[in-house]
Amino acid sequence: MAKKTKATKETQEIEYAPIQPQIITETIEKNYMPYVMSVIISRAIPEIDGLKPSHRKLLYTMYKMGLLTGPRTKSANVVGATMKLNPHGDMAIYETMVRLTRGNESLLHPFVDSKGSFGKQYSSDMRFAASRYTEVKLDTFCNELFRGIDKDAVDLIDNYDGTMKEPVLLPTTFPNVLVTPNTGIAVGMASSICSFNLSEICDGTIALLKNPKLSVERMLDIVKAPDFPGGGAILYNRDDMRQLYETGSGSVRIRSRYNYDKSANCIDIIQIPYSTTIEVILKRISDLVKEGKLKEITDFRDEIDLSGFKLTLDLRRGVDPEKLMNKLFRITPLEDSFKCNFNILIDSTPRQMGVIEILSEWIRFRMGCLRRELTFDLKKKQDKLHLLLGLGKILLDIDKAIRIIRQTEKEEDVVPNLMKGFSIDQIQAEYIAEIKLRNLNKQYIINRISEIENLQAEIAHIEEILGDDLKVKALISSQLTEIKKKYGQPRRSQLIHINDLPAEEEEEEIENYNVRLYLTREGYFKKITLQSLRGNDEQKLKDGDELIFTQDTDNLSDLIFVTDKCQIYRAKTADFDCVKASAMGDYIPAKLNMDEGEKPVFMRIQKGYPAGENFVFIFENGKGVRVPVSAYETKGNRRKLVNAYSSASPIVGVFYEEEKHPFEVMLVSDADRAIILKTSLIPVKTTRTSGGVTLMTMKKGQKLVRCLKDFEETYENAKGYRKLKIPASGQLLAEKDLRVQQLKIDG
């Protein structure tokens, strides 16, 4: 019987490597910067051929699959093949393909001829079918992407695993970078390139080829403005367009186009801005209808079908369609802006460029491609000429050539013997030796060497072109003229000059009358006419609620609400309906679509943003700050403003300080201590999110619980709490004031 041995466990101590300190700049340089450059160069920013790597890999795969001339194939086949170059998920590759298809309507000149459902660029809900159901091939337009690619026009590099080659760029025969719209977000930079009309771009490039010092003004005469796949009407301002062409940065305003159907009393929107979607437009119109701001519309719906895009608005009887559309242009995305940022990779370096600079870089790139293509053709013709010259030598004595071949005993000696017999090189001898016996006749040889003269002329012509930049540019111009003739289309985007627009209609006149506004601590708001208040001004409030704001104004006033979530909301008095004193009123968080749990803590009737006036913020940690009201002015008068004040500590009190009218505030802590100080002691900070300075010093764990402006009637010993400097220690509340404080807390 074998002896059993008892197993023993050996305890091994794990030695941890010591933590080494590292300079943050070195960490960023070694770890973060490679990622940044990878995103910029290999993913997000298009290059001078107008393509990102994902687009280029997909199109090249389809080209190698023979889909430029062959029949369509299932999209799934293309996706699978593309993974050899682009090792990402099948859905990422398919989504890239979708945007390039004719069916998606994202491009002026689609690269992919598609069959099946590929969604629509103007809709977020119209999704594309699965790749197993759709079919694709390359559009004939792609001939202009790949012309010369098999003639060494561009560099080829290994794919990610070294199993095949892929082009660094595609040798596009036209400035695709300005014809195909492209957007991308990298790390610390972004690119947003709008599309231009192919015919105009070809004409502009030809003009620049002839005159490299072409002015922006002249370019504007040729390439008038961007041209979007979805059409629409561009509101044309030459000054703005000049800035875009010069700097590569700016925006293009686009309006929807519509038809009015008098018989049905409806408006048909037939084109919308490229930068929005049908769902966004419908949502906005729906909200405005619910708010009673679009009473002219009785119904709205999309009627998109195979015939094309159409959004229908049914109108009330007597509504002027033109006035209504002008109103919709003001308040809905039916008029929108396309933000342009012409950021392009040039030699792996991102550069923001204007239109002329981009076209100049493309010309430089195209000249390089064309020279490489011509050099390839030149080498082929020179090699052929060399062979034919050798063939011409045996014409003088065909019998000698046959005799040399017949009398040579070993096969490996045939070529050397031919070289010696006719004074030709090895390449020529190899060519002659491979000629079939039946072709070793005078007629065949004469027919072949008759090409020599044409070859010599062609070689001389190519060499002449290669030696003259002007001739290379002339060749590019002829190609662009051919492309324009073959693929050029009329503009889809109409141009409406700003000066030709009718005078903007004033907004619908709002009735003005005197009202009194109320805001409660729980966030309920009331607008009551002064007439309604006569004889009955007792306000109905929710149990435990109290009024924190009451003021008389008119129906045209602007309102500001400051919330406990560091946000400011803007509204107009006219946005609210008049109610009676017996009503609860509007619940502000719901009315203004505030965040969950957010409540207003301050309200003001705001008249402009005058200098010298400030918001005063008092925080739970005993700090306070004054922020100029001008810091809250925005160009677009946004309804919601985030980061309105510091979030470092909960807000206790918000006040408004008019110019040269400081006032006193009373701060009370949970330790029953109080101070009174003038707001002029609180420093003004131009940064909205400044945490301020300490006003009242408190022990650890203590906090402010009340902040009052009008306190004389509440606290009898007010004079004893006044301080002339900050920070200041709190004074214990007097016995009577302590009872008042306790009542406030209990209530």
Image (cartoon, helix red, strand yellow):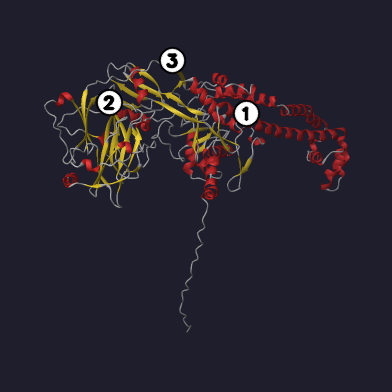
Question: In the picture provided, is 420 more to the left or to the right than 178?
Answer: right
The earlier-in-sequence mark between 3 and 1 is 1
The earlier-in-sequence mark between 3 and 2 is 3
Question: Does the CB distance between marks 1 and 2 fall below 8 Å?
Answer: no
Q: Which residue is mark 3?
A: 500
| Amino acid residing under circle 3 | Asp
Question: In the picture provided, is 149 more to the left or to the right than 502?
Answer: right
Q: Residue furthest bottom?
A: 1
Q: Secondary structure at mark 2?
A: loop
Question: Does the CB distance between marks 3 and 1 fall below 8 Å?
Answer: no
Q: Which residue is mark 1?
A: 363
* Res. 481 image quadrant: top right
| Amino acid residing under circle 2 | Ser
Nearest to the eye among marks 3 and 2: give it: 2
Q: Which residue is mark 2?
A: 557
Nearest to the eye among marks 3 and 1: give it: 3
* Res. 604 image quadrant: top left
Is the residue 259 above or below the residue 62 in the image? above
Is the residue 37 above or below the residue 490 in the image? below
Residue 57 position, x and y percent, is 56, 40
Q: Secondary structure at mark 1?
A: helix
Question: Does the CB distance between marks 3 and 2 fall below 8 Å?
Answer: no
Is the residue 21 above or below the residue 642 in the image? below
Residue nearest the observer in this picture, 586 or 19: 19
Residue nearest the observer in this picture, 334 or 475: 334
Residue 525 position, x and y percent, is 22, 33
Q: CA distance from mark 3 to mark 1?
A: 36 Å
Q: Secondary structure at mark 3?
A: helix
Residue 730 position, x and y percent, is 26, 47
Q: CA distance from mark 1 to mark 2?
A: 58 Å
Nearest to the eye among marks 1 and 2: give it: 2
